[in-house]
Amino acid sequence: MSAGTAAPAADARQARRSRTVLLLIAVALAVIDLAVKAVAETLLSTGATTDLGPLNIKLLYNRGVAFSLGADLAPWVVIAATGLIIAALTWYTISSAPSLTALSRTGAALLLGGAIGNFIDRLDGQGVVDYLHSGWFPTFNLADVFITTGVSLFVLGTMLSSQARTEK
């Protein structure tokens, strides 16, 4: 193999590695989220609430999407719409992973992991299990934390990357 073909092969391996790592992290986060939801559902199914100071742990089901938007739609509509969005999000994050900064890739993995966790949870038609309640904000779950943090990191990584490019 000549020196000219070694660099493209190394680039291809690095691209494959960044895509694989992003997907593995996303799947691991979805599994963690689903496990926590199962525990919350088991422990809180009696209607019990646990006060943790600024947060209460209490079981609710969100049949809609963010902030219960679309809760009055048929479950299959919400499932189909979120499935299409997640498919597009997955395609975008996987195809762009090699060109993303580490911060943006971390954000993309968090976003994708949270979205997959909520999507799988939604498939039974009962809605997403929410259990973190503050009293002043809608009840949410770990996947929602992943999604919000992921979007923030993705945007921050993208902004810092474009800023660095314009300064060169």
Image (cartoon, rainbow, N blue to C red):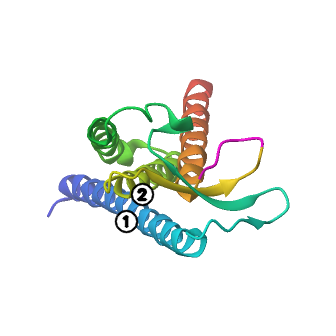
Give whichever of discs 2 and 1 has the lower sequence position. Answer: 1
Q: Which mark is residue 137?
A: none
Determine the residue located farthest toward the right in the rendered image.
Answer: 53
87 versus 27 height, above or below: above
Classify residue 62 as left or right of residue 136: left
In the rendered image, residue 137 lying in the magenta stretch gets the answer yes
Q: Which residues are magenta?
A: 136-140
Instruction: Kindly identify the residue that appears in the image at 32 percent across and 62 percent down.
Output: 20
* Position in image of residue 139 (x %, y %): 64, 48
Q: Main secondary structure of the magenta part?
A: loop
Q: Which mark is residue 117?
A: 2
Residue beneath disc 1: 24
Dividing the image into 4 quarters, which one contains the C terminus? top right
Label 2: state its secondary structure: helix
The amino acid pointed to by label 1 is Leu
Classify residue 102 as left or right of residue 7: right
The amino acid pointed to by label 2 is Gly
Mark 1 neighbour class, 10 Å CA radius: few under 14, some 14 to 19, many 20 or more: some
